[in-house]
Image: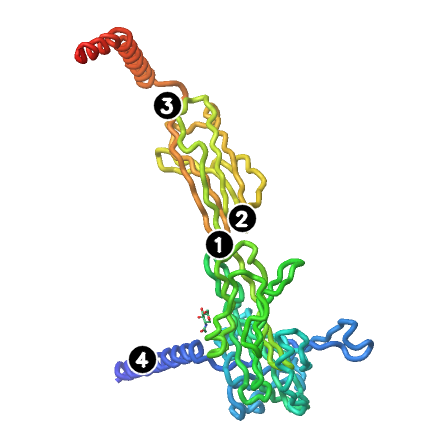
Amino acid sequence: MTDFSTIYKLSVVALIGFIQASSSSSSSSSSSSSSRCPVLECWFVQEKAGRGGGLTGATTQEKSLLHIRTEAESYDPESQRPPSDIDPNRIYIITDPAATLCHRSFNAPRGSIKKPQCEINPFLPQPSSLRWVASLTDSALSPIYLQADWFSASFQGLDKQLGVSAITRAPTGTKEHEVILSVTSKTMSAKTRLGDPVTLDCGFWADSSSPLVTSGFSVEWRYQTRGDGRLVLAYDGKTDRLADTHEEGATLDFEGLHKNGNASLILEEAKVRHTGTYICTVYLPYLLAQVAMELEIVEPPSLSLHPSTLPLAVPGQTVKIHCEASGFAPLPLELSWEFKGADRTTRALGTGSVSGHRQAWDGTYSQSTRLELDLSKLDLGRGGEVTCVAVHAGGTRRASMTLSIIGFSSPSIEDSMAMVGVALVLYGLIKFVSWTFTGSGPEKTNGQEKKEN
Ligand SMILES: *[C@@H]1O[C@H](CO)[C@@H](O)[C@H](O)[C@H]1NC(C)=O
């Protein structure tokens, strides 16, 4: 009987374990694919009230909580107890029908240190004076609709997988917001090789029931880098044209723009000067939302060695090799030398004398290093492979050449014999050649003349 009950207990334990394992795996798979809508902690940032209004630039930061849902009525906020460190007045419900904010990158694993980032600010709808946006507000006047609480919220998913910026609206004084316009990007930090085509992702969604949507939208891409900002292109939704382009080879996919709100920027060919921050802004009349993303052009160097082959070296000699790394971006580059002997062991030869870097017309850099191998001090046996190593963000590059050394510290008997042999052969050859020219040369011409006669 005891045996039977043990087996029974064991099988019950196994069954429970199985159920737990399968249920936990199914719940984790559902959270990664269909994604529950998250509850996001968010900084509520606003300008300090009073004393000079917004001119002082002083802001206050408060913790807030956003309950995300995709449909109105689908969530009951009373069912969850608010955290004690958050003011109940700063708890909001946001309805996002496009489910952009339910992306898995906004669902941090429980207990993880990494969290999605979020900031929310009060937003004041106002007409834009930009040429390619102003036309949108010509007719679409809906002051009653605009009289509401508006927020501008920006989100960044885990590991920068997704950036979202949303404009939300709530009837004045209520806490239930609806997303009216959202702009997203999946290329928050993009890296591309030189010369490749680049697509910087930007998509938008607008609430089709909003009266603002009927009069169209505009799109603007700006470029920013330290101290330099410029318009890349502007799309005027009213005229359905590019209003301005300041970058050759930059365009939008117009079909995708109208069909799916795909406002991605396409650059025909990546150049070094394209490295920087890009801001995609989508305008509706009175509203705008924007996401900023980073593009970096990363190109590893090409290496060339001078001389291209080494003559036989003799012990005591100093061998000089020059390694030129060119066409890379960005800085820095780490140059060094390695030696691999006949026994296949590798040893470091240091950096050599590394030059400063130079920049070419296309923005790429070049840098070189010079190796001086003093064979009287270094014992490299009978030689081996000398390699120039360039470590770069775009990858490590190597260039090698063979170094052959005659003999060891002093020429061996065999080498001396071989050298004497070579000298003898050379001597014989010279003798033979000079004999042929002085002796038989004129006779041949005589013979030819005879034949002609
Ligand atoms: C948006 O357009 C770009 C460029 O045509 C394309 O590469 C990308 O796949 C599109 N994105 C979506 C979500 O359709």
The tag earlier along the polypeptide, 1 or 3, is 1
Under mark 4, the amino acid is Leu
Under mark 3, the amino acid is Ile
**Which quarter holds ligand 1?**
bottom left
Pointer 1 local density, CA inside 10 Å: few below 14, some 14–19, many at least 20? many
Q: Which residue is mark 2?
A: 364
C-beta proximity under 8 Å, tags 2 and 3: no
The tag earlier along the polypeptide, 3 or 4, is 4
C-beta proximity under 8 Å, tags 4 and 2: no
Alpha carbon of mark 4 to alpha carbon of mark 1: how far? 62 Å
| Element type at mark 4 | helix
Q: Which residue is mark 4?
A: 10
The quarter in which the C terminus is drawn is top left
Indicate the position of residue 312 as horizontal and vertical percent values: 38, 25
Alpha carbon of mark 1 to alpha carbon of mark 3: how far? 44 Å
Which of the labelled discs sits on residue 406, or is there none?
A: 3
Residue found 44% across the figure and 79% down from its top: 31
The quarter in which the N terminus is drawn is bottom left
Under mark 1, the amino acid is Leu
